[in-house]
Image (tube, rainbow, N blue to C red):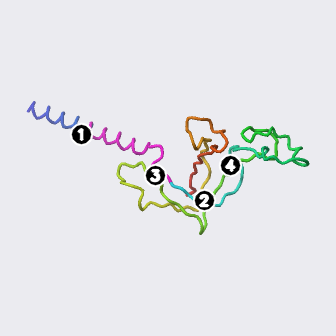
């Protein structure tokens, strides 16, 4: 009888350990930073109320009204009140010209990106990060390499 109780306790502990491992495995799948990445083209956008991107005061135009803009001839510096500041779009929507392609997946149960596509009506900018598109180790504000990553959340 004592042996049966010990075996039952060990089986119960093994079951708890198995369930704990499954929960940890599931939470690691759910917590993956970017499970699927899509490239979208021909997306319509509205409302330039997103984060600051760059300014157009370095365009080399001379004379009025360009000499009155007050820029510092550096498109990578923010000048408050300058009318040539550019901000990211906040809202996006699709139409019949919008296309998408899956370019990366990070799911343990998927072999490749084949067959994935995304359809949406609209989404909102929720993340914005400036990057150097040529060398990730360098600053974002390098001519010819300045770029950004924009992350959106779909309205469902």
The mark lying in front, picked from 1 and 4, is 4
- Residue at (90%, 47%) from the top-left corner? 63
The residue under label 1 is 15
Q: Which mark is residue 104?
A: 3
Mark positioned earlier in the residue sequence (2 or 4) = 4
> For the C terminus, which image quadrant?
bottom right
Q: Is residue 98 above or below residue 109?
A: below
- Residue at (63%, 39%) from the top-left corner? 140
Where, by quadrant of the figure, is residue 31 drawn?
top left
Q: Which mark is residue 97?
A: none
Give the Cα distance between marks 3 and 2.
22 Å
The residue under label 2 is 122
Q: Verify CB contact (< 8 Å) between mark 4 and mark 3.
A: no
CA neighbours of label 2 inside 10 A, class few (<14), some (14 to 19), many (20+): some
The secondary structure type at the circle numbered 4 is loop
Residue 147, how many percent across, how many down?
A: 62, 45
The residue under label 4 is 88
Mark positioned earlier in the residue sequence (3 or 2) = 3
């Amino acid at each position: 009888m004592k042996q049966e109780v010990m075996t039952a306790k060990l089986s119960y502990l093994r079951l708890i350990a198995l369930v704990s491992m499954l929960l940890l495995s599931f939470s690691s799948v759910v917590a993956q930073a970017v499970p699927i990445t899509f490239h979208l083209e021909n997306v319509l956008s509205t409302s330039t109320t997103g984060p600051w991107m760059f300014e157009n005061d370095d365009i080399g135009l001379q004379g009025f009204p360009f000499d009155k803009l007050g820029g510092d001839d550096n498109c990578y510096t923010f000048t408050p009140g300058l009318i040539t500041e550019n901000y990211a779009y906040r809202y996006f929507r699709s139409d019949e010209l919008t296309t998408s392609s899956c370019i990366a997946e990070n799911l343990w149960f998927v072999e490749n990106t084949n067959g994935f596509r995304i359809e949406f009506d609209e989404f909102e900018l929720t993340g914005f990060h400036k990057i150097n598109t040529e060398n990730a180790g360098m600053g974002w504000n390098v001519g010819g390499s300045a770029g950004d990553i924009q992350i959106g959340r779909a309205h469902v």
